[in-house]
Image (cartoon, helix red, strand yellow):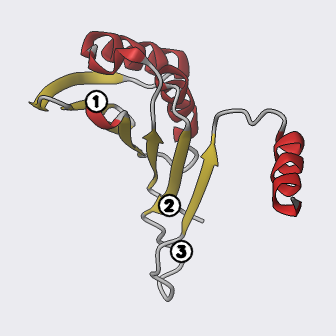
Amino acid sequence: MKLIARHLTVDLYNCKNSKLLDMDAIKHTVREALADIGFGLMDLNSEQVDDSHYVLLAILREGHLAMHVYTSLKYVALDIFLCKENAQPEALSKALRSFFKPDKTKTTFLKRGDFNSPKDVRPKVKTRVAPLRKIHNTGAKVIRILARRSN
C-alpha cells in the first residue's frame, strides 16, 4: 500500500499532571520527545485562547503536531500528522501520554493518501479506547458487589 502520511488523533481524559497550565514545561516536553524520537522541529508556537484553553503547534520536517489543552476539563487533544509511509506517530503520543498522565485515552489512526485503492475511497480508521489507570483487586470488588446483591 502506498501512503503519503499517517495521522494519529489522541484524546487524553482526566490528565493528572499539575502542569497543565505550564506551557513552558509542555513545550520542553515536546522538544525533548521530538529530539528523542528523531523528528526535526522547525517551529514551535503556543497561544492562550482563553482562561482554560491553550493551543500548541509544532511544525516538523516530517509533518506537524497540534495540541489543544483544556485545563479546566483536564483534557488534551493531540493531532499528529507525519508525512511518511512508515512513520510511527505512536512514539510521540506515548511520550506525551507519559507527561500528561491521563486516566483514559482514545486513539484514532488514519492512513492518509492511499493511492492504491481507487475503487474503495472509504477511510480506513482504527480507534482504540484504553483506560490507563491500574485496576486493583478487581476480583474482590466483583465478589463484594455480588455478595451485596444476594443479600
Using the rendered image of the protein, determine whether residue 145 is visible from the camera's viewpoint. Answer: yes
Q: CA distance from mark 1 to mark 3?
A: 42 Å
The residue type indicated by label 2 comes to: Lys
- Secondary element type, mark 3: loop
Q: Determine which quarter of the picture holds residue 91.
A: top right
Q: CA distance from mark 2 to mark 1?
A: 30 Å
Q: Nearer the viewer, mark 2 or mark 1?
A: 1
Residue at the extreme front of the image, as rendered: 151
Q: Are marks 2 and 3 in contact (CB under 8 Å)?
A: no
Tell me what residue is drawn at x 34 percent, y 10 percent: 25
The residue type indicated by label 3 comes to: Asn
Relative to 47, residue 119 above or below: below
Q: In the displayed structure, does residue 138 sit left or right of residue 47?
A: right
Residue 116's mark?
Answer: 3
Tell me what residue is drawn at x 49 percent, y 89 percent: 119
Residue 150 screen position, x and y as percent: 88, 62
Say which residue label 1 marks: 71
Q: In the displayed structure, does residue 29 sit left or right of residue 50?
A: right
Say which residue label 2 marks: 111
Q: In the displayed structure, does residue 102 sit left or right of residue 30?
A: right
Report the front residue among 38 and 58: 58
Residue 149's mark?
Answer: none
Residue at the extreme bottom of the image, as rendered: 119
